Image (cartoon, rainbow, N blue to C red):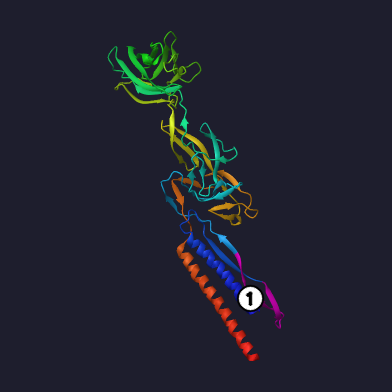
Amino acid sequence: MASFFIPLTGLESDSTALNTIANDLSNMNTTAFKGQSTNFSDLFYQQIGATGSGDPIELGAGVKVASNETTYSQGSINATGNATDVAINGNGFFVIAPTSGGQEFTRAGDFSLTSTGALVTSGGGAVMGYPAVNGVVNTNAPLSAINIPVGQVEQPKATTSMNMTLNIDSASPANTVFPTDITVYDSLGDPHTASITYAQTGINTWGYSVALPAADFANGVSVPVTGTMAFDANGNLSTITPAGGAATTVGTAAGDISSIPLAFNGLADKAGNLAISWNLLGPSGTPTISQVDTASAVSATTQDGYSSGQYQSFTVGSDGTVTATFSNGQKLNVCQLALGNVTNLQGLQLLGDGDYAATLASGTSSIAPSGTDGLGTLQDGALEGSNVNISSEFSDLIIAQRGFEANSKTVTTFDTITQETINMIH
């Protein structure tokens, strides 16, 4: 009988709404959970007659669940301090490769590291990103599973260039000697103290000598690299005269000199020969060594070598770049997290564990680095919370409960009427 069928559709629909609300409330503390709302629509109508003007008289057949829409609004970002936790601030999803294969998406950034350094989701799926070669990320390369160099050792790098920013006091007495040191590294990562000595040889003229300790050489003999520096009337380094060579203007023009080559061969530790370029110019193209009337002092030294280092930790930048830090103080970009998105979010298939899959309804997914193509940025050491609004859920719960009660009352009313009808027959 239609009298029973119609309220039963209401009971079934309200039951779905109650289940949806219960699911939202049970996941109010689930990382990056997105709440849902149940929408109803009426069923088909049966025409049982017409009015005198010809208007149809129609009787409805009940209600059905029209949709269960997911609300993809941003959840709150909560700091955790855990390096493997990453939150998306804005649009997009992390791209993951589940253990079953294929491609899925998630907003839940509560990742963890395996013993081999693989970055995985709580369900074991591999987090995907753009690979890096020698610290340079290639966003045009195919996505690959992110792997952190846990337990790995970064190979040493021999010093190939160095720079020293200093001033030599122009008021120094004759024959003044100003010694300085800088640490450089050979191909085995062993440090060497390079002593640079400036000795006044005349007006606006200083000799330089660069040497390593004699004990650093297999033959026990240190041969310094020497020459002369000349300064103009304004205290700017103007010319360099290497030992046995001709004076050359310091600058960037054709024929100018911008660096002094330093070579140290036959090291005692059997490392490769050291070939270092002593850069005389700063980023702006001006000399970093000056001679003015103030105390002689070194303000900065730089060199590009380093010893070997053990992996210590990693961080994730706002653009998704994953940078590993080693015990030698060096940092290396190992990859960049990728984000994905679809045209129709409601078309995504919900898989559980905070995972989603693209469907024909959602449209083809697009993949790009964070902060591009309308995608959000990333926050390291934080997680996105659930976007469930408990106040709204309780309000919806009351409405759904009243709807269920009303439909239940309708069933009992029709049952009473049916019983009365049976009694009339008897």
Quadrant of the rendering where the N terminus is positioned = bottom right
Secondary structure beneath label 1:
helix
**Which quadrant holds residue 326?**
top left
> Circle 1 sits on which residue?
5
Q: Nearer the viewer, residue 178 or 365?
A: 365
Q: Residue furthest left?
A: 173
Q: Which kind of residue does numbered mark 1 sit on?
A: Phe
Q: Residue furthest top?
A: 244
Relative height, residue 319 to residue 282 (above, below): below
Residue 55 forms part of the magenta stretch: yes
Task: Identify the residue at image location x=49%, y=71%.
Answer: 398
Task: Identify the residue at image location x=55%, y=69%.
Answer: 15
Q: Position of residue 60 (x, y in %)?
A: 65, 75
Left or right of 175: which side holds 334? Answer: right
Relative height, residue 214 to residue 131 (above, below): above
Badge 1 density bin: few <14, some 14–19, many ≥20, Cα 10 Å:
few
Q: What residue range appears in magenta? A: 44-66
Quadrant of the rendering where the C terminus is positioned = bottom right
Q: Position of residue 307 (x, y in %)?
A: 42, 26
Task: Identify the residue at image location x=44%, y=21%.
Answer: 186
Q: Position of residue 68 (x, y in %)?
A: 58, 62
Q: Position of residue 339 (x, y in %)?
A: 55, 46
